[in-house]
């Protein structure tokens, strides 16, 4: 039994397919199949039921899987405990963020890295969480930020950072005010500019509308954050966004915002690392730096929301 077999077990169990695991791990399918067969032979039991549509983990396989996950977690803990802690980190860290988070954190995060570890290079990728998740699991990213916890996956280690408040956003001439909350039901009378239904933000707005017992009217759909902001500023309608990425536009009077109540729309921001491979000290530093940046912006009133208790790594 070796680590590569346990890693293969985790990915095949998650994906239910050798071909999908082969694509994700960039290992030819026969090699993965052989690893599973060798593991089954050593343990003396079948770990998967094979059928035409893929592979389904058996009851015995689930028991082995739980141990495999704990072993991978302990391996990372050993690496962390034994890793040297150089004064200056070097290398490249690839960070994935949703577009609205990118607007908030890239500059302060790059500033912190330049001040603390000038030899450390950063690569930022901004995309929907689904794409980021795929790239993280394939090894193209070292960590990702995501709104709401990604679907529970055995190949991820997820830490919640904060709960973000979502506000009603309109043109500055509409004179919304941060100290004058509005009932969510008020959105029934507004023309709204929202992302398409596949976007998580749209799902939150529609869920709140159902809870408020109203129908919302979407006049324009735009998946680009910048397009949403420009359309609202031009007076085409209102939208729902976090405060931080539009803070400067609100301060200048281009946009105005108001909190929403009954219900109050929120979403959770998390950091996700891969759990099946080593997390570098540089990637851990970036995760801590992101949390520090968020805490600073929340404290200064730039990012509306509340921080969640930090967990010891």
Image (tube, rainbow, N blue to C red):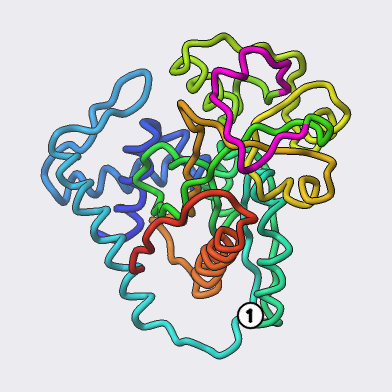
> Nearest the camera: 127 or 184?
184
Question: Relative to 312, is 120 on the left or the right?
Answer: right
Q: Identify the secondary structure beneath mark 1.
A: loop
On the image, the x and y values in percent for residue 126 come to: 69, 47
The part of the image, by quadrant, that contains residue 298 is bottom right
Q: Of residues 194 and 48, which is closer to you in this image?
A: 194
Question: What residue is shown at x 55% (from left), y 18% (from top)?
Answer: 185
Q: Residue furthest right?
A: 234
Image quarter of the N terminus? bottom left
**Residue 218 horizontal/vertical position (percent):** 69, 14
Q: Residue at x 70, y 72 (%)?
A: 121
Quarter of the image that includes the C terminus: bottom left
Q: Local crowd at mark 1 within 10 Å, few (<14), some, or many (≥20)?
A: some
Given residues 234 and 38, the one toward you in this image is 234
Q: Is residue 295 left or right of residue 211?
A: right
Q: Position of residue 166 (x, y in %)?
A: 58, 38
Which residue does the image show at 40% across and 35% down from the upper left? 18
| Left or right side of 32 for 166 | right
Q: Is residue 19 above or below residue 191?
A: below
Residue 311 among those drawn in magenta: no
Q: Residue 23, can we see it? A: yes
Q: Is residue 27 visible?
A: no
Give the magenta part as a residue range: 175-193
Identify the residue under disc 1. Answer: 90
Q: Is residue 21 left or right of residue 125?
A: left
């Amino acid at each position: 039994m070796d680590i590569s077999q346990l890693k293969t077990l985790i990915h095949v169990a998650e994906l239910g397919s050798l071909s999908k695991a082969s694509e994700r791990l960039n290992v030819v399918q026969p090699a993965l199949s052989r690893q599973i067969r060798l593991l089954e032979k050593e343990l003396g039991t079948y770990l998967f039921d094979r059928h035409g549509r893929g592979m389904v983990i058996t009851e015995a396989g689930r028991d082995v899987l739980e141990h495999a996950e704990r072993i991978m977690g302990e391996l990372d803990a050993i690496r962390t405990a034994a890793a040297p802690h150089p004064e200056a980190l070097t290398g490249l860290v690839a960070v994935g963020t949703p577009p609205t988070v990118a607007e908030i954190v890239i500059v302060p995060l790059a500033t912190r890295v330049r001040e603390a570890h000038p030899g450390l290079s950063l690569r930022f990728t901004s995309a929907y969480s689904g794409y980021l998740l795929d790239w993280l699991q394939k090894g193209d990213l070292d960590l990702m930020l995501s709104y709401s916890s990604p679907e529970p996956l055995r190949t991820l280690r997820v830490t919640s950072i904060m709960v973000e408040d979502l506000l009603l956003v309109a043109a500055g001439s509409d004179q919304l005010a941060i100290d004058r909350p509005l009932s969510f039901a008020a959105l029934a009378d507004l023309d709204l500019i929202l992302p398409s239904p596949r976007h998580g933000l749209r799902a939150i707005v529609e869920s709140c509308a159902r809870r408020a017992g109203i129908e919302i009217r979407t006049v324009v759909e735009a998946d680009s954050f910048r397009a949403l902001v420009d359309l609202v500023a031009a007076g085409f309608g209102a939208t729902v966004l976090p405060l931080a990425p539009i803070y400067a536009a609100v301060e200048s009077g281009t946009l105005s915002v108001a909190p929403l109540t009954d219900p109050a729309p929120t979403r959770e921001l998390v950091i996700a690392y891969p759990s099946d491979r080593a997390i570098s000290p540089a990637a851990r530093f970036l995760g801590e730096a992101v949390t520090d940046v968020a805490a600073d912006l929340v404290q200064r009133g730039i990012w509306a929301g509340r921080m969640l208790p930090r967990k010891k790594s």
